[in-house]
Amino acid sequence: MDKRRMLTRLAVSLLAPAIIMLSGCAADRAAEGGAQYGNAASFTIDPVSGKYLRFKARAVSLPVGVLHLPREPDAAGIAALGQRLDAAPPNKLKSLTRTPVAIQRGDGTFSVLEGADTVSLLKARGARSVPVLLDEPFSSGVRDIDGLYASNRAARGEFEALVSELHALIPGELAFRPGEKKRERVQEKMKNFFGGKAQYVTDLLAARIVVNDSASIATALKVFAGRPEVVQVKDRWKNPTRLGYRDLLTLIQLPSGVVGELQVVHRDIESLGVISHGLYEFFRAHASDPSKAWEASCDKAQAVSQRILGLAADDQVGLLLPAKADLERAARGLPAARTQQEALSILGEMEAILGRIAGQAQAA
């Protein structure tokens, strides 16, 4: 073992018992999932896994009990893999397998997006932990934007069938995205978030279930917990976005390896879609501006959005109805604001409307 790796292991074992060593672009964001790994055991190579897999410097060993497989194990495929490995010379074993790739599922477990058969085989042969590379959600086999669109078109039927199956267990109104996501928006996401890599754009296939109450949100969480195809769940009902938006945002891996998105949202939140989308579009366009030229208006947009969506989350969306048209008009115009002063003027108008609503509620 080289000196640097030995020191890294020692530092982690002493100083970071609750930190996970991550790979790729997952490093900055995966800590949000609450994983409690990264201690010395995470760098201990299980003897069974170590026989068949190289322990890459960016890998972390995770207990087999926290590795979630997105489909039922393929018995024939696992048997064939085992026979191939058993027939190989010892010095060739590790060249026949690849380190599995996983993502945080959102419930303390990790979904294996690539290498599920390898994990199943190692588990069957007695491995207690498996080294994996942690990454962001991605669709397997995608290399560029043309391949992304082609694979998603081919998988649309299986996506709609699976989502319809889930919908049968969740009371609400189901709708699929009409048409395809605009190519310009996909290219923008690739550039801004994924280093130009198309496979990480996972919302070309998208659906939404609109529910009538918070009990249905809880039902959806229970349904998702028991489904292997659901590889990630973001409970933004419990932990809303910076703008106060609340929903359940899930990712589903299809048998083809394509990943699609299913959202579950409360009807009151959905009813404010024009308003929340206008605020979101403005915030998305300017919040990451390194010059911070729009910082004041972004802060105000965030506060306004939180107030509006907070009323919906508190079952008080009715208070907004008399002024909904005025709020929608302002929100539609906000993304087109050409100067911060113009944006602040629009947001000031929205704040004044909210102030009047609050005053009328207190008077009542």
Image (tube, rainbow, N blue to C red):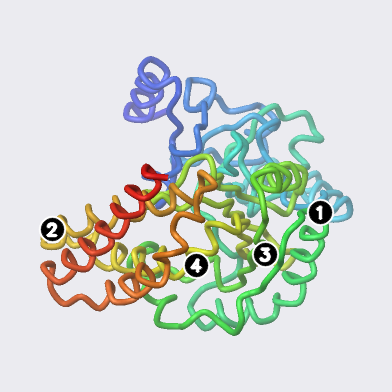
Alpha carbons under labels 3 and 4: distance apart: 13 Å
Q: Nearer the viewer, mark 2 or mark 1?
A: 1
Alpha carbons under labels 4 and 2: distance apart: 27 Å
Mark 4 is on which residue type?
Val
Mark 1 is on which residue type?
Leu
Q: Are marks 2 and 1 in contact (CB under 8 Å)?
A: no
Residue identifier under label 4: 201
> Is 282 rendered above or below residue 312?
below
Identity of the residue drawn at 66% across and 74% down = 176
Residue identifier under label 1: 169
Residue identifier under label 3: 257
Alpha carbons under labels 3 and 1: distance apart: 24 Å
Position of the C terminus, as image quadrant, is: top left
Alpha carbons under labels 2 and 1: distance apart: 46 Å
Marks 2 and 1, the one that precedes in the sequence = 1
Residue 305 visible to the viewer: yes
Residue identifier under label 2: 292
Dot 4: within a 10 Å radius of its alpha carbon, few (fewer than 14), some, or many (20 or more) residues?
Answer: many
Where residue 129 sits in the image (x, y, percent)? 65, 30
